Amino acid sequence: MPHSIVASFLVLLLTMGVSSGQTPGIPFRTTVPEIAKAEQLIVSVAPDWSATEVTIFLFGRADTGGRWQLAIPAIPAVCGRHGLAWGIGLQGGARPGEEQKKEGDEKSPCGVFRLHEAFGLEPAAEVGKLAFPYRQVTRFYAGVDDPASRFYNRIVDAARVQRDWKHAEQMVRPDGLYRIGVVIEHNWTQIPGFGSCIFLHVWRGPSFPTDGCTAMAESNLRTLIHWIVASKSPLFVQLPIDVYRLQTSWELPTLPTTSR
């Protein structure tokens, strides 16, 4: 998620009661039927729960009954500086007894997620031909990370809505990390305090973890954005390698041998 002011987050914990042991009340699903309907998967695998580096694999298949094929070689990427925790996605919440992602924990969500849209600073015509929704962001756009806002976990044009948030991340950043990206539908039902504004975005470099997003080199991210096709129902899957055994019940593709 975007960087939050620590003091604001502490106030949030006190006012909303989101503690390290609290869960959103969403059960974990041992099967994810949406995977069977997908023809494209972006698979992000971490060595373990505390890792800050991940490897991304792009898998495709000709139809929903086909065999998964590796479409693009492994892409190096980084995740949250405090590793990973279960997000809220198509798999539901966390597995029983395992950690659930919270707002401000600087952990990347693991699970299975839909992709919402691509975004960037350039007009769509300058990005090139895409087969996926794209939105140009301007200096008025903000990613709202205030759980008290009705716009929580959404990118909004602040010039077109009535502001009700106390803090948010500006989408036009001085460091340019959001010059192009993809919105991940993590916690898309907007449960307050369980994480917001999770993107695939441009990294600072291979040694710089994020505040909770997954980031990679701009050239690789642009390749990914031009690869995804909305009609193929692409999904984002992020898991530690030891949890990837769920590929049996979730029907995930087999990873290349070198990644195991």
Image: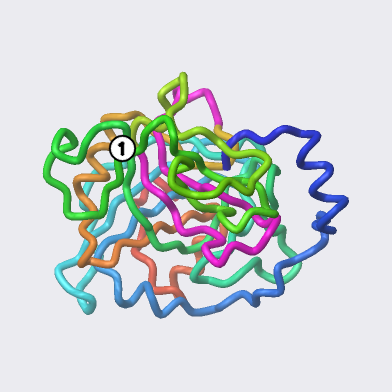
The image quadrant that residue 83 belongs to is top right
For image coordinates 79% across by 48% down, the residue present is 12
Determine whether 141 is above or below 154 in the image.
Answer: above
**Nearest the eye: 114 or 241:** 114
- Within 10 Å of disc 1 (Cα), the crowding (few <14, some 14-19, many 20+) is many
What kind of colouring is applied to the model shown? rainbow
117 to the left or right of 46: left
Classify the position of the N terminus by image quarter.
Answer: top right
46 is within the stretch colored magenta: no
- Image quarter for residue 132? bottom left
Q: Which residues are magenta?
A: 181-209
Helix, strand or loop under label 1: helix
User: Which residue is painted at 27% across and 57% down in the image?
Assistant: 59
* Residue at image coords 83%, 42%: 10
In the picture provided, is 206 more to the left or to the right than 192?
left
Q: State the image quarter where residue 222 is shown.
A: top left
**Front residue of this view, candidates 3 and 145:** 145
Residue sitting farthest toward the right: 14
In the rendered structure, does residue 207 fall within the stretch colored magenta? yes
The residue singled out by tag 1 in the image is: 221
Q: Majority secondary structure of the magenta segment?
A: loop
Q: Residue furthest top?
A: 174
Q: Amino acid at mark 1?
A: Leu
Q: Is residue 60 above or below residue 203?
A: below
- Number of callouts: 1
Q: Residue 89 location, x and y as percent?
A: 52, 66
Q: Position of residue 72 (x, y in %)?
A: 23, 46
Rendered location of residue 3, percent (x, y) = 62, 34
Question: What residue sits 38% from the left and 45% below the top?
Answer: 56
In this rendered view, identify the residue nearer to me: 159 or 4.
Answer: 159
